[in-house]
Amino acid sequence: MPEVTPEPAAPADTLTAPLVVEFPFTRSLGPVRGAFLTGLRERTVLGIRTAGGRTLVPPTEYDPETGDELRDLVEVAPTGTVTTWAWNPAPRRGQPLATPFAWVLVRLDGADTALLHALDVPGPDAVRTGMRVRIRWAAERTGAVTDIACFTPDDGPAPEPAEPAPHSGEFTDPVTGVTLPARLDYTYAPGRAHSRYLSGLAERRTLGERCPACRKVYVPPRGACPTCGVATTEQVEAGPRGTVTTFCIVNIKARNLDIEVPYVYAHIALDGAGLPLHARIGGIPYDQVRMGLRVEPVWRDGSRYPDHYRPTGEPDAAYDSYKELI
């Protein structure tokens, strides 16, 4: 068994936080993929025949070798042979099985390519390349690859090679589109420079870092100057007040964001900073926001960062004072 090196822990002054990026992705299927998924709903596996005589499963709309459009659908068997596999000891959310299983590439009988899915076996000793398997269909099928619940071992012998039967691809109530959940679940570590910036915000202070070469102050800090290519370690407190350099008016309401539209999002050059940060502008009608407007942060109780920026009442900043920060 090879030695496993544990992942090094983050330094004590570095923050970490769990983050989830999730959204539904809706797409139309077309005649080939639509027929394939509709077929799964009806316990039928369809492939596509290329001009060279190969059968591709899952089917593609174009020949991967010639680029020619493909339309000759054929039906293949629900049994096949494992061509390669990998053991999954700890299934994750959304995977086919809740218990440990094997990821397998299965070349179904009649196909020339392999289909990726899960194999339900008790342990890695129960799976091998070349083993025979069979589809276990889901009890409820909707026209998705999950209509194949998984593969299971099949004790039957491999059949004699035979030509797949042609199929029209026509079904009652065909599947024409799917909505797929996309989800990325990970732990974010912002690094030491940005961790110090976030910790400063928790104290209602805005901390940047000054480049020792060009003397520009970066807010938020980046740990290095992208212009000079040197590390930035000198901390500088900027703001809290600043100047609107540019802005946009948002007219589309975002999901799960309790802000009424229209509202203004702006680039704000904090006093003492060498480049602007972006934030929402409040406390003023959206059509009165302008370049040069002087603003200050507004904090909510218990918040780690400003909720928005509002006008200070000062005269607008002269254009020459912020033109290099636009």
Image: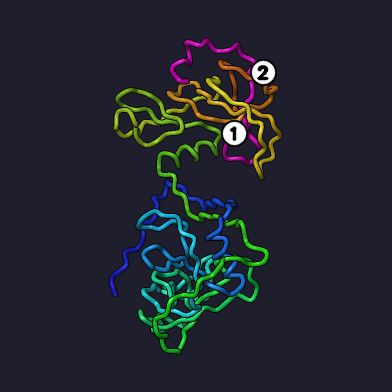
**205 relative position to 261: left or right:** left
Disc on res. 306: 1
- Whether 22 is drawn above or below 41: the answer is above
Residue 308 falls within the magenta-colored stretch: yes
Residue linked to disc 2 = 288
- Whether 21 is drawn above or below 305: the answer is below
Disc 1/disc 2 C-alpha distance (Å): 21 Å
The magenta stretch is 298-326
Rendered location of residue 287, percent (x, y): 67, 20
Q: Nearer the viewer, mark 1 or mark 2?
A: 2
Residue drawn at 64 percent across, 63 percent down: 174
Q: For the residue carrying disc 2, how many other residues have a C-alpha within 10 Å: few (<14), some (14-19), or many (20+)? A: few
Give the image quarter of residue 315. Answer: top right
Disc on res. 34: none
Indicate the amino acid at tag 2.
Gln
Q: Nearer the viewer, residue 141 or 35?
A: 35
Give the image quarter of residue 148. Answer: bottom right
